[in-house]
Amino acid sequence: MNDILPADETLWTFFEQTARSMLRAYGYRQIRTPIIEHTNLFSRGIGEVTDIVEKEMYSFTDSLNGENLTLRPENTAAVVRAALEHNLLYDGPKRLWYIGPMFRHERPQRGRYRQFHQVGVEALGLAGPDADVEIILMCQRLWDDLGLTGIRLELNSLGQASERAAHRQDLIAYLEKHSAILDDDAKRRLHTNPLRVLDTKNPALQEMAKGAPRLIDYLGDASREHFDGVQRLLKANNIPFTINPRLVRGLDYYNLTVFEWVTDKLGAQGTVAGGGRYDPLIEQLGGKATPACGWAMGVERILELLREDDLVPQDEGCDVYIVHQGEAALSPALVAAERLRDVGLDVIFHCSADGKGSSFKSQLKRADASGAAFAVILGDNEVAQQQAVVKHLRSSDQQDNQVGVAFDQLTDYLIDAMVASADA
Ligand code: ATP
Ligand code: MG
């Protein structure tokens, strides 16, 4: 689990604001659910025989009432829970998004943390391939808005339960033929959830997985048609994709379309987003059968890509740093800071570390280090003359970079100066 320090604030804010404006562009509304849910929401929703539920959840017993609770490992099940609890679907489909921390007890490594963040969308009540394609287009737009390139789309269809059942027979037979090389996970899943075996991270099993019967070959007409529709609409929008028949995703609630966005720039943790259609989930969690689709993206991995591609925005300092010295200057300086904030400027007011005041020189050093555009300086002389000295900290001209400005002119002067420096 990581501390996110002030040095990364600009990057996080850039990502969050870009994501929010993309989400608004598609009419999505934010939902915020608690980070703790009842454990059985996830075991029922995600599936008992999945990496997440078998070994990645932080679950505990509430010592006060014995309830089994879990720190959310993902948010789709919780969003559906909330939508049902508050009857959000009573007047038709809902397009919802969220951002926040998720928790999985995994082996920490680059791009894989135990507390990480996801942005995700859930389109509840929409059945057609147009909905699948819209949520994919949202990802593409976000990559474009962030300036990211080289993230490719992999696509598959998991069909419907009956189609998976037919495929399952053949898959189990195939896996049994290869039982000698199966690892413990695969052996355990062979009969409970054989599709998951194809999702293996074990390199020794990849070749075997490649030769397995492909679910895509078992799709019926309706599933085929849905998948064709998705592909046709992606092509119409010039979104390149590859079909990956082994893409099954790590959660059990998916059907029909599944997809991942993958980059080669992050080593083994190259999947930056994943999603698909989960038509059975809402009914499974106690609601009326309702089609739905969505995705979740790993924020840390995207930030890592932004760093990798040198797309970290510059850290802008505040507008004004107030430097002051002496009893007489203290209160006019504090008042001036408030007046400047009243007109929308960002202001740091110097407070000395020992509470006794510091020299002009050390204050100006701090002003410089803060990245502020201007220092406003007040001492005994300035108070006597009812004016402040304004120093342009970003000006390269060392001679002509400070002027005296009357107290009652200060806000106007600084607003004009900020506008002028933004234009320059
Ligand atoms: P992986 O195959 O990498 O384990 P996953 O299939 O478990 O991913 P999802 O549950 O689909 O991941 O979550 C969506 C996205 O969240 C992933 O594509 C990834 O970007 C991010 N993510 C998942 N687990 C972690 C983690 N432990 N640390 C950081 N990001 C993560
Ligand atoms: Mg995982």
Image: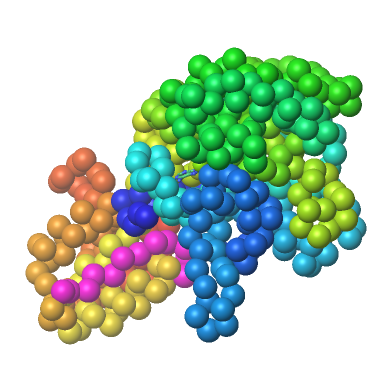
Q: Position of residue 316 (x, y in %)?
A: 36, 48
Image quadrant in which you'd find residue 390: bottom left
Q: How many marks?
A: 0
Q: In front here: 315 or 362?
A: 315
Q: In front here: 199 or 142?
A: 199
Q: Position of residue 232 (x, y in %)?
A: 79, 18
Q: In which quarter of the image is the C terminus?
A: top left
Tell me the colour scheme of the image: rainbow
Q: In front here: 24 or 342?
A: 24
Q: Is residue 411 above or below residue 55?
A: below
> Is residue 34 something that shows in the picture?
no
Residue range corresponding to the magenta coloring: 342-353
Look at 52% across and 31% down and name the residue there.
200
Q: In which quarter of the image is the N terminus?
A: bottom left
Q: Does the magenta stretch include residue 343?
A: yes
Q: Is residue 360 above or below residue 236?
A: below
Q: Position of residue 23 (x, y in %)?
A: 66, 45
Q: In front here: 61 or 333?
A: 61
Look at 71% across and 47% down and name the residue there.
122
Q: Give the main secondary structure of the magenta stretch.
A: loop
Look at 15% across and 46% down and name the residue there.
399
> Is residue 113 something that shows in the picture?
yes
Q: Left or right of 1: which side holds 283?
A: right
Look at 25% across and 60% down and name the residue there.
375
Q: Position of residue 35 (x, y in %)?
A: 55, 64
